[in-house]
Amino acid sequence: MLKIKFETLKHEQKIKIDETLNWKEIEFEGGVYPYFAPVKVDLNVEFSLGKVYVQGSVKTQIIHPCDRCLEPVKLDINGDVEAVYVPNEKVKEVEEVIDEIGTFYYDPYMEFLDLTDRVVEAIILEIPMKVLCKPDCKGLCPHCGINLNEHPDHVCDQDNDKTESPFYILKKISFESKGE
């Protein structure tokens, strides 16, 4: 469980969280991606002078489609969690501090501190901007959608019919200057 009781944290000063979570999927950029492996969380949480310091790591695997051919790709996730929680009586729930990455305000009277969002952030930050099944992925045929990795010699019959392109009419425009 990634919720820490503040009273326990204040009393013990340091808490170690070492858990394996069986989450099913993660939402990211409008898509839902399944986990392939359990989420292993290893966090050290320390309470000092009213602030809460969180450091640790997250390991898992997710399935993400290749950005060129849409085949499923197993991504190894090895993320780091680093956060500082600063008390602020004006907030009712945890809020991120503007201009300070990894710093959050918390209500000092709240009962629990939930670290789930920090773990999810660590996972999302490890997902590459461009996911490829292999570096030389050929993608899909732009006309018929066949996977060009599986059919490297594919020649699309629809490639000959260029009149269906919305840009076909632009070929008829002459850009030669007429003598003025």
Image (cartoon, rainbow, N blue to C red):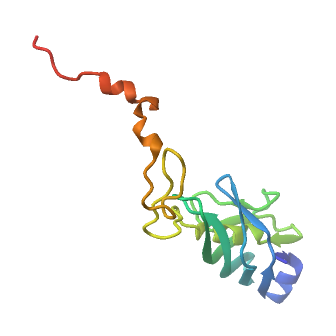
In the image, 1 versus 6, the foreground residue is 1
Quarter of the figure that contains the C terminus: top left
Q: Residue at the far top: name it.
A: 180
Which quarter of the picture shows residue 23?
Answer: bottom right
Residue 19 percent location from the top left of the image: 79, 84
Write the residue at 67% across / 76% down: 61
**Residue found at x 62% / y 76%:** 77
Measured as percent of width and height from the top left, residue 56 is found at: 66, 82
Residue at image x 81%, y 70%?
Answer: 114
For residue 93, which quarter of the picture?
A: bottom right
Residue 177 left/right relative to 80: left
For this view, does 108 lie left or right of residue 180? right
Q: Is residue 146 above or below residue 159?
A: below
For image coordinates 83% across by 82% down, the residue present is 9
- Residue that lies at the very extreme toward the left in this rendered image: 179
Q: State the image coordinates of residue 38 (x, y, percent, origin top left).
A: 76, 79
Q: How many marks?
A: 0
